[in-house]
Image (cartoon, helix red, strand yellow):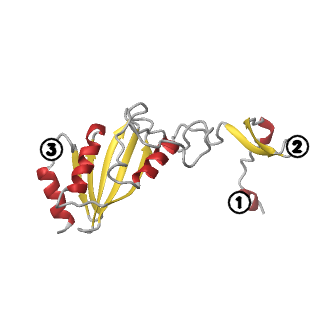
């Protein structure tokens, strides 16, 4: 059973309210869905005889600030039985919460926590939605396009106090001297 059969079978049998669009490529199948249908669609893909998705490879988020639904949430899945990859993609905005799939794929708990920590996309009734890559007192979500490159606070070790201190960032203008002359242009004067 190949990717083309799985693609055609899923397109024929899945309810159209679950899948807005499907694309097929040599690397796998891509399904575009809405946030309400993500859990039933992944249930179907895991439990149905002709798909048998056993592994959630990862869940990632892509930020597009110019869109109404600025976040794309991408579930990359693998069927080891049929040697096929399936990518399920949905869109969410800053307040929309997605359905967790940790009950289907236990490894997804880690990916959903990372998605929350780095992008700010939260899950409804997630069993353990805590920060995973940043500190617990961290403000913001670093993979958002509107997150400042320098961050909000500076963390340093204070030797007299013998502890780690968080302070607001102070950037003075005098340290920002930019020499716009190219070193290559200076060499051509000879």
Q: Nearer the viewer, residue 124 or 171?
A: 124
In the image as oriented, which residue stretches furthest toward the top?
95
| Residue beneath the point at 77% across and 36% down | 173
Residue 65 at x, y percent in the picture: 45, 36
- Is 85 displayed left or right of 176 in the figure? left
Q: Badge 3 is on which residue?
A: 15
Which numbered tag is attached to residue 160?
2
- Is 86 displayed left or right of 115 in the figure? left
In the image as oriented, which residue stretches furthest toward the left?
12
Q: Quadrant of residue 50?
A: bottom left
Q: CA distance from mark 1 to mark 3?
A: 62 Å
Label 1 residue SS: helix
The reply to whether the C-beta atoms of the residues labelled 2 and 1 are less than 8 Å apart is no
Q: CA distance from mark 2 to mark 3?
A: 65 Å
Of pointers 2 and 3, the one earlier in the residue sequence:
3
Q: Badge 1 is on which residue?
A: 184
| Residue beneath the point at 24% across and 47% down | 41
Of pointers 1 and 3, the one earlier in the residue sequence:
3
Residue 100 at x, y percent in the picture: 36, 43
């Amino acid at each position: 059973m190949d990717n083309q059969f799985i693609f055609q079978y899923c397109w024929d049998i899945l309810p159209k309210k679950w899948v807005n669009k499907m694309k097929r490529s040599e690397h796998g199948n891509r399904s575009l869905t809405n946030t309400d249908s993500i859990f039933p669609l992944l249930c179907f893909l895991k439990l149905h005889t002709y798909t048998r998705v056993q592994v959630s490879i990862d869940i990632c988020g892509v930020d597009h600030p110019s869109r109404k639904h600025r976040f794309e949430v991408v579930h990359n899945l693998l069927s080891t039985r049929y040697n096929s990859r399936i990518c399920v993609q949905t869109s969410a905005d800053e307040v929309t919460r997605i359905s967790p799939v940790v009950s289907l794929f236990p490894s997804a708990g880690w990916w959903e926590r990372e998605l929350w920590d780095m992008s700010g996309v939260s899950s409804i009734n997630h069993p353990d939605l805590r920060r995973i890559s940043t500190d617990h007192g961290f403000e913001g979500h670093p993979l958002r396009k509107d997150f400042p490159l320098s961050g909000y606070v500076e963390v340093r070790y204070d030797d007299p106090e013998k502890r780690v201190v968080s302070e607001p960032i102070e950037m003075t203008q005098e340290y920002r001297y930019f020499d716009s002359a190219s070193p290559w242009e200076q060499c051509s004067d000879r």
